[in-house]
Image (cartoon, rainbow, N blue to C red):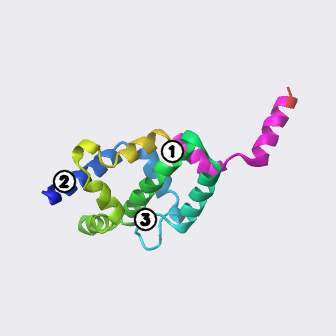
Amino acid sequence: EEDHVALLGLLSLFERLGTADKAWEFVHSRSEYVASSGDGYSGVFNDKAEDFLSQLGGEDHKILENFKPVVSWLAILVYNQQQPFKQLMRALCSSPKVMAQARQPPDTRPFLQLSVAEGNMDFLTNLFHKGLGGLDSVLWQFQHITAQ
């Protein structure tokens, strides 16, 4: 029974991945965020995310906190994308983070965070690309306003 639940959970990961193009592209295009061991996200991603988390509050904090496990799951898939399917599945099944989600009862909607993250990818991509704004952003806005 537990194996059946885990299999359904893994299938839901692939189902959600089918509508998560932006989240996939985010991890796929940033190899520095994939751990060299292939078992999740890298220290580079973690350090950046933790730095942002220490400065964000409210809903933005929740969005980024929700995104961390998503990047971990996707990093495993990205790392193993050129491998035979059997090896890809072995990598997923050997990940405690993936299997903790996969073993959730179907009515709890395993891997829902992937769908939630996909809805927030514009914010997340902008955050990781441009940071929290900083002085450069403020000066540009100020110059734009004063030029009018």
Q: Position of residue 85 (x, y in %)?
A: 25, 64
The disc label shown at residue 63, or none = 1
Q: Does residue 48 appear to the left or right of 39 in the view shown?
A: right
Image quarter in which the N terminus is found = bottom left
Q: Which residue is rendered at x = 43% and y = 56% of the image?
A: 69
Which stretch appears magenta? 122-145
Q: Does the magenta run of residues contain 125?
A: yes
Q: How far separated are the C-alphas under marks 1 and 3? A: 19 Å
Q: Position of residue 51 (x, y in %)?
A: 63, 57
Residue named by callout 3: 40
Q: Position of residue 110 (x, y in %)?
A: 30, 48
The secondary structure making up most of the magenta span is helix
Disc 1 is placed on an element classified as helix
Q: Which residue is rendered at x = 57% and y = 41% of the image?
A: 58
Can you tell which of label 1 and label 3 is closer to the viewer? 1
The foreground one among 39 and 23 is 39
Tell me the amino acid under the disc marked 2. Val
Q: Does residue 10 appear to the left or right of 59 in the view shown?
A: left
Tell me the amino acid under the disc marked 1. Ile
Quadrant of residue 54 within the rendered picture: bottom right
Q: Does the magenta run of residues contain 132?
A: yes
Q: Earlier in the sequence, mark 1 or mark 3?
A: 3
Labelled pair 1, 3 in contact (Cβ < 8 Å): no
Q: Earlier in the sequence, mark 1 or mark 2?
A: 2
Q: Does residue 48 appear to the left or right of 63 in the view shown?
A: right
Q: How far separated are the C-alphas under marks 1 and 2? A: 27 Å
Q: Does residue 19 appear to the left or right of 59 in the view shown?
A: left
Q: How far separated are the C-alphas under marks 2 and 3? A: 23 Å
The disc label shown at residue 5, or none = 2
